[in-house]
Image (tube, rainbow, N blue to C red):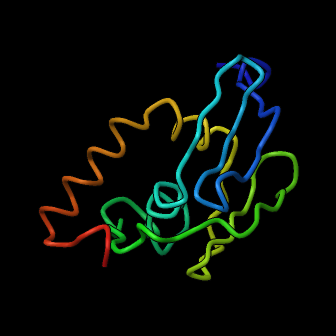
């Protein structure tokens, strides 16, 4: 897929007192991504590790909220959460993927929590 063909965000808006990030793209897709979902799927090294197989399943983030969204160049945003996490850089492609594949990604996350004996609440 060429760079020109990739969806580009047209709007990012924090909604519901920080519970949700609404993202719209120029191809007509729009997604409401929960703060918890964005936090546990953060592209940061804390969550994704520094290479394959180093991912960490982050638990206990059901109450986390979005405090702020800050542009990173023309390609991404940094999201600051109420648990002080702010090191993940969410590219437009990654936000789009999180929206399009939400059901599969969330189900995989819930399965991993269960397998590891962790919970969304803590």
Q: Residue at x 70, y 17 (%)?
A: 28
Q: Is residue 73 above or below residue 45?
A: above
Residue 107 appears in which quarter of the rendering?
top left
In which quadrant is the C terminus drawn?
Answer: bottom left
Residue 10 image position (x, y, % from top left): 82, 32
Q: Along the horizontal axis of the image, is 82 left or right of 56?
A: right
Q: Residue at x 65, y 65 (%)?
A: 66
Q: Residue at x 19, y 53 (%)?
A: 111
Residue most toward the bottom? 84
Residue 39 image position (x, y, % from top left): 51, 64
Residue 3 image position (x, y, % from top left): 75, 26
Out of 82 and 93, give the one closest to the viewer. 82
Q: How many marks?
A: 0
Q: Is residue 104 above or below residue 115?
A: above
Residue most toward the right? 73
In which quadrant is the N terminus drawn?
Answer: top right
Residue 92 appears in which quarter of the rendering?
top right
Out of 92 and 49, give the one closest to the viewer. 92
Q: Residue at x 80, y 20 (%)?
A: 4
Out of 120 and 46, give the one closest to the viewer. 120
Residue 110 image position (x, y, % from top left): 25, 54
Q: Along the horizontal axis of the image, is 14 left or right of 55?
A: right
């Amino acid at each position: 897929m060429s760079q020109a063909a990739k969806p580009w965000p047209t709007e990012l808006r924090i909604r519901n007192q920080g519970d949700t990030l609404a993202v719209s793209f120029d191809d007509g897709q729009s997604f409401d991504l929960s703060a918890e979902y964005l936090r546990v799927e953060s592209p940061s090294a804390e969550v994704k590790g520094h290479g394959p197989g180093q991912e960490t399943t982050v638990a206990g983030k059901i109450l986390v909220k979005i405090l702020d969204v800050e542009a990173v160049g023309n390609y991404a945003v940094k999201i600051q959460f109420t648990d002080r996490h702010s090191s993940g850089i969410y590219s437009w492609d990654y936000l789009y993927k999180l929206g399009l594949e939400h059901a599969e990604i969330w189900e995989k996350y819930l399965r991993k929590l269960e397998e590891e004996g962790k919970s969304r609440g803590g």
